Image (cartoon, rainbow, N blue to C red):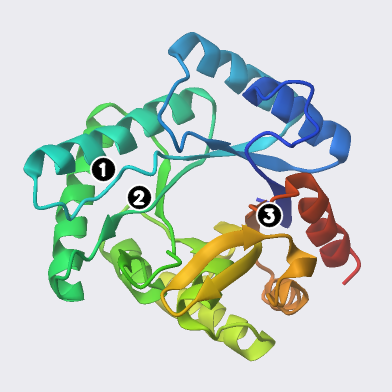
Amino acid sequence: MTGLLFGTAGAPRSSRQPSTISGIERIVELGLDCMEMEFVQGVKMGEAAARQVGEVSARTGVRLSAHAPYFINLNSPDMEKIRASQGRILQTARIASLCHAESVVFHPAFYMGQPPGTVYEAVKRYLGEVLSQLGRENIKISLRPEVTGKSSQFGTIKELIDLSVELKGVAPCLDFSHWHARTGKFNSYPEFEAILLQVRQRLGDEALADMHIHVSGINYGKKGEMNHLNLEESDFQYKELLRALKDYKVEGMMICESPNLEGDARLLQAFYNNL
């Protein structure tokens, strides 16, 4: 991977149609590099369409990732819901791999009032089963549990790094905006640097060379994330983050989730390229 690539969460707003292929074509026109396919309400793309997306991605050089459905909880008290959650991750991975996507991003679980250590063991076990099934199907795609924005959700940076150490095929999706909203801190160069050092110390330089990052403006309260904002309407110090990423030679994808998707993606790209 060369350098940091910038793109949008879903097809850019200015795409001719709200389709994945139209989105990829618009990414090229905008001079951006990558796109995350949003399967957040369910995987509604068939295999034939996914193969077409893969061809367009290969032809244009636009790199892809996919976000699995929101309805995932690997810590549900109901085993049927756990199996359904595993199925959603698997279905996303199957379609995403046909699209030539590199990663599947998902929100892994809720604490449900249980101790974090207990929840961690459940997530590790059920995610391990998903990885085993992907191995049997010979699907090579990175599973990336996301740093979550609310204190009720499993997904601290430490939890995700621990999972990545223990499970081959897992790597964190670092949502710096979520972490700022969740902690009320982590919004300065030294704090961003501390996160990158933690990743490097535990996962090695190769993790910094292949990162998947989410960024947006963010509105938050006592319980964490409330909603996404445009970068300039938020207190999130994106310029300090980009400086830290540049200084640590971080490579991979930065996906913008602001309401004005491509506007903020290009803002991030332009600032980064001028550093």
The residue nearer to you, when weighing 190 against 248, is 190
Residue 223 x, y percent position in the rendering: 41, 75
Q: Is residue 203 above or below residue 93?
A: below
Residue 38 x, y percent position in the rendering: 53, 37
* Label 2: how many Cα within 10 Å (few below 14, some 14–19, many 20+): some
The residue lying at 17 percent from left, 74 percent from top is: 117
* Displayed quadrant of residue 172: bottom left
Left or right: where 2 falls relative to 156 = right
The residue nearer to you, when weighing 135 against 51, is 51
In the rendered structure, find residue 169 and report the number of the disc placed on it: 2
* Label 1: how many Cα within 10 Å (few below 14, some 14–19, many 20+): many
> Gap in Å between the C-alphas at discs 1 and 3?
31 Å
Q: Is residue 245 above or below residue 257?
A: below
Specify the amino acid type for callout 3: Ser
The residue lying at 15 percent from left, 64 percent from top is: 121
Specify the amino acid type for callout 1: Leu
> Gap in Å between the C-alphas at discs 2 and 3?
28 Å
* Displayed quadrant of residue 108: bottom left
In the rendered structure, find residue 131 and report the number of the disc placed on it: 1
Q: Earlier in the sequence, mark 1 or mark 3?
A: 1
What secondary structure is found at the residue carrying circle 1?
helix
What quarter of the picture does the C terminus occupy?
Answer: bottom right
Q: Is residue 103 above or below residue 202?
A: above
Residue 176 x, y percent position in the rendering: 57, 69
* Label 3: how many Cα within 10 Å (few below 14, some 14–19, many 20+): many
Front disc: 1 or 3: 3
Residue at the disc numbered 3: 258
Label tally: 3
Assess whether mark 3 and mark 2 are in contact (beta carbons under 8 angstroms).
no
Left or right: where 71 falls relative to 25 = left
The residue nearer to you, when weighing 94 against 68, is 68
Assess whether mark 2 and mark 1 are in contact (beta carbons under 8 angstroms).
yes
